[in-house]
Image: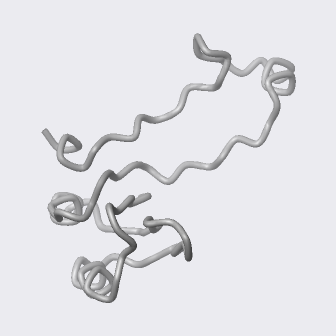
Amino acid sequence: MIVRYKTKPDQRELNRISLLDASTKRAYNRLPMRAIRVPVDKLYTLADDADVEFITLDKPVLGMTEAARLTANEALSANGMPPTPACLPATTLFQ
């Protein structure tokens, strides 16, 4: 999961992630986000924090050009880009 925070995560958040049996896959020095691995039954608890802005799936980044995607016969959306998962605010993720 990619977790975007309203402010840069601090030691309190690292402790909270640990208590959720989650692990940090990647921390970013200048961005208020983390890529983490978290058990599915802990997602509600992860999202239920005032500093969590949104949570989304950690998917591979597509580095191909439009021409390469067309050559590969990959489906494109109306804007010419491949379909991507939505980034949802944490407050609406589990409604």
Q: Is residue 42 left or right of residue 74?
A: left
What color scheme is it?
A: one colour
Q: Residue at x 40, y 78 (%)?
A: 23
Q: Nearer the viewer, residue 27 or 83?
A: 27
> Is residue 77 positioned above or below 3 on the image?
above
List the single residue furthest toward the top.
78
Q: Residue at x 55, y 49 (%)?
A: 59
> Is residue 22 positioned above or below 82 on the image?
below
Q: Nearer the viewer, residue 4 or 73?
A: 4
Q: Quadrant of residue 69?
A: top right
Q: Quadrant of residue 30?
A: bottom right
In the image, residue 21 lies at what x, y percent?
A: 28, 80
Total number of numbered discs in the rendering: 0
Q: Residue at x 77, y 17 (%)?
A: 73
In the image, residue 43 lies at what x, y percent?
A: 23, 60
| Quadrant of the rendering where the N terminus is positioned | bottom left
Q: Is residue 95 left or right of residue 53?
A: left
In the image, residue 63 lies at what x, y percent?
A: 76, 42
| Quadrant of the rendering where the C terminus is positioned | top left
Q: Residue at x 65, y 17 (%)?
A: 76
Q: Quadrant of residue 79?
A: top right
In the image, residue 6 lies at what x, y percent?
A: 32, 61
> Is residue 65 positioned above or below 76 on the image?
below
